[in-house]
Amino acid sequence: MFSTRKTINHDPFSFLKILVPPTIIKAIYLCFVASVVSLILYFAFSNYSHCFTQHHNVVVPTIFNHRTITTVNSSDKTNISHILFGIGGSLKSWNKRRHYIDLWWKPNVTRGFVWLDQKPSSNMTWPETSPAYKVSADTSQFKYSCWYGSRSAIRIARIVKESFELGLENIRWFVMGDDDTVFFTDNLVTVLAKYNHNEMYYIGGNSESVEQDVLHSYTMAYGGGGFALSYPLAAELVRVLDGCIDRYDKFYGSDQKVQGCLSEIGVPVTKELGFHQMDIRGSPYGLLAAHPVAPLVSLHHFDYMEPMFPNLTRIDSVRKLVGVYKMDPGRTLQHSFCYDLSRNWSVSVSWGYTVQLYPSLVTAKMLDTALETFHTWKSWKLGPYTFNTRSVSSDPCKRPLVYFLDRVESVDGDETLTVYKRYVQKGEKDCPQRDYIPALEVQFFNVSASSFNPNLWNKAPRRQCCEIVNGGEVKSVAQIKVRGCNRFERATPVKKVETL
Ligand SMILES: *[C@@H]1O[C@H](CO)[C@@H](O)[C@H](O)[C@H]1NC(C)=O
Ligand SMILES: *[C@@H]1O[C@H](CO)[C@@H](O)[C@H](O)[C@H]1NC(C)=O
Ligand SMILES: *[C@@H]1O[C@H](CO)[C@@H](O)[C@H](O)[C@H]1NC(C)=O
Ligand SMILES: *[C@@H]1O[C@H](CO)[C@@H](O)[C@H](O)[C@H]1NC(C)=O
Ligand SMILES: *[C@@H]1O[C@H](CO)[C@@H](O)[C@H](O)[C@H]1NC(C)=O
Ligand SMILES: *[C@@H]1O[C@H](CO)[C@@H](O)[C@H](O)[C@H]1NC(C)=O
Ligand SMILES: *[C@@H]1O[C@H](CO)[C@@H](O)[C@H](O)[C@H]1NC(C)=O
């Protein structure tokens, strides 16, 4: 996060009209890779890489005792006050990045600090709406030998230790993130509350780009997506971290140095699908529109992707998503599929973000596969990713009509109405085929849904169902109801569905 990286600006939402044949794209990539991507640049694009060189240090096993935890009443449910955030910042990036933090930080509710590399000048007023800052301790005595990296990785890795050593009361979880990580804190609490904080847990997610996971690690929770350490694990880590920092001096990133240490303790990462490192380039649309059935916990890397919403800046896009999230945290980005079998329409709702209308019958398996509107992080290739994708056709007759969140309203306190408006890319041609004509009349989707009960996340996950309420008479507004599925209900696009 401290490397200077350029984002290639191209037309946002150009994915809606990909007209370049794949062979030309391949040729462009080859040129790009050959001429531009020197090894240094290759690594500079990575936040969390480490040297190829393997370690041959003899690692002395650390003996640790089982501790008795006395600080918390374990029968109380975990809430936001039990989390201590440690945000890796720097004075230089602060003024730019604070706008992302301010979107999720709740003064006097969220606890934690942004850790800076130096003290802000005394004439700088620190905003009350931001987390208070702390200045990281000097790290000059530590070894760092990753030639293309930055020593700041040591400082960031030690945030968990410095946070722990503050000795704050009633902390169950230490959550680390970058200054461009946005946490959806209600969902973070929901996820962490599932786990016994008196045991040693390390919770987070991988990189989306396989090239990153292959090069760096599949067994690491990527720091930009954020990760959580339970109190007893943090306590154990803190005892040995400084030694690990010297042992893993060749690792580039802070998250890898921490994971090296956790590997010595023997605690693997518990993967949660809602943590998003967002190691992708281009438009995040396809990924966000196909979120797994898991609460949205974090997003990252906004400055390296196109804005999430068309017509909006990056920060306003995040503001919009955070705004709708506040109306129904657990439902944010959750997927539902419904069919109008009298017209052969398929509808995919990604709550709070987008609706796709297909004037054909599309299987659920297809709908839950992400449209590949993005490239990999390091080499800007078309995959592979840690999830399946399908390509976006250049033919408007093979693409859905796309609607983006326009506004959200609260209805009767425990229901929401989200309205999605058709988005047409500038210069984009409508499909002239007969089956598209009635679909093209639909300008809005009105989606009503009851507030998502977060307790559902403690049960076996299941995608919710939806129905088109005004089926036959849809004109310019299609009315959708999202709800839990009935016992024998399925998203099956055929008329006669066997019920038993
Ligand atoms: C722990 O919490 C439970 C339920 O909230 C309560 O009954 C009990 O008295 C608490 N114990 C202590 C030591 O605070
Ligand atoms: C969180 O739980 C603690 C008990 O561990 C309680 O004292 C506190 O009021 C709760 N805070 C919130 C914000 O719910
Ligand atoms: C936070 O709490 C302090 C002390 O109770 C108060 O002075 C301050 O105004 C609060 N800040 C915000 C942003 O609510
Ligand atoms: C703040 O102080 C620094 C030096 O201490 C100075 O360079 C800068 O111009 C000052 N900024 C303002 C806004 O006064
Ligand atoms: C829907 O598709 C089926 C075949 O999949 C076809 O028989 C039927 O005529 C179509 N209905 C409409 C309204 O297009
Ligand atoms: C985007 O802006 C264009 C023109 O400024 C407008 O016609 C269109 O409705 C906007 N789209 C959305 C989704 O707000
Ligand atoms: C859709 O929602 C809007 C409120 O934003 C409402 O005015 C309109 O009547 C709704 N349309 C339908 C068909 O329900």
Image: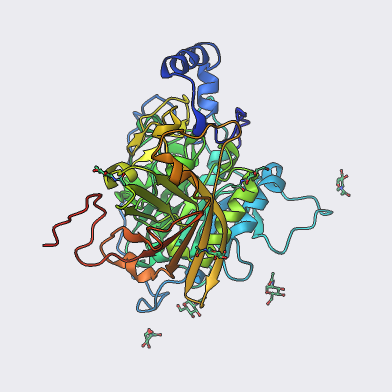
Compare residues 412 and 10 and report the one nearer the observer. Answer: 412
> Which quarter of the picture shows residue 384?
top left
Q: Is residue 172 visible?
A: no
Residue 42 spot, x, y in % from top left: 51, 23
Residue 457 spot, x, y in % from top left: 34, 65
Tell me the quadrant of the picture where the C terminus can be found.
bottom left
Query: Position of 96 compared to 24: left or right?
Result: right
Tell me the quadrant of the picture where the N terminus can be found.
top right
| Residue at the limit of the structure toward the left, as seen here | 500
Question: Relative to residue 431, is residue 418 depicted above or below?
Answer: below
Query: Position of 377 compared to 92: left or right?
Result: left
Question: Relative to residue 155, is residue 28 depicted above or below?
Answer: above
Picture colour scheme: rainbow
Compare residues 11 and 34 and report the one nearer the observer. Answer: 11
Q: Give the number of callouts.
A: 0
**Identity of the residue drawn at 35% across and 48% down:** 346
**Identity of the residue drawn at 61% across and 37% down:** 2
Query: Position of 403 compared to 194: left or right?
Result: right
Ligand 5 position by quadrant: top left
Compare residues 353 and 321 and report the one nearer the observer. Answer: 353
Question: Relative to residue 108, is residue 398 depicted above or below?
Answer: above
> Which quarter of the picture shows residue 59?
top left
Residue 162 spot, x, y in % from top left: 54, 55
> Which quarter of the picture shows residue 453?
bottom left
Q: Can residue 38 be seen in this view?
A: yes
Residue 398 spot, x, y in % from top left: 39, 33
**Identity of the residue drawn at 64% across and 60% down:** 131
